[in-house]
Amino acid sequence: MSSPEDAQKQQAQDQKAQLLQVQYNKYQEQVSGMQSQLGDLTSQLQEHIIVEKSLTSIPPNKREGRKCFKMIGGVLVNKLVDEVIKILNDDMKVLEKTKTTLEQTLVDTRKEMEKWMKNNNVKVIKGQQ
């Protein structure tokens, strides 16, 4: 038979394991969310690059006064090609900066998670299939 003290110790260990699992799940959700955002940013950046290359491939003398449409806030707006190229370049700079920042945050979060796992002696065990 187990004593009440053994039962209390077991209960305390179970609670600690549950808290560690909750924290581990939070880290996993953060990392997964950042990876998803990073994928979205990369896709947007690639789309911007494709459009920018398409527009800049038109010789400057032929695109002078030429109009195109740009989606701004869900509304198509009539703009000059040169204006759109400038807007695209500005947007690409912002996307690159955001992507770089997010990549660094992801690296930092992974390091923090690894440190937390080491400090709490957490080992990942894959379930049997």
Image: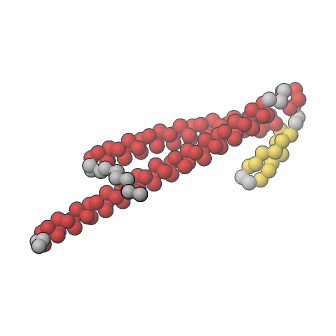
Query: Quadrant where the C terminus lies?
Result: bottom left
Locate residue 82 relative to residue 27 in the image: left or right: right
Image location (x, y in percent) of residue 56: 78, 30
Locate residue 7 relative to residue 48 in the image: left or right: left
Locate residue 77 relative to residue 119 in the image: left or right: right
Query: Quadrant where the N terminus lies?
Result: bottom left
In the figure, 54 relative to 15: above or below?
above
Depth check: give the residue in front, 126 or 123: 126
> How many marks overall?
0
Residue for point 63% across, 35% down: 93
Image location (x, y in percent) of residue 46: 66, 39
Residue for point 50% across, 48% down: 34
Residue for point 59% across, 37% down: 96
Residue for point 46% across, 49% down: 31
Locate residue 83 relative to residue 120 in the image: left or right: right
Image location (x, y in percent) of residue 123: 31, 50
**Display coloring:** secondary structure
Depth check: give the residue in front, 43 or 75: 43
Examine the image and state in which quarter residue 3 appears: bottom left
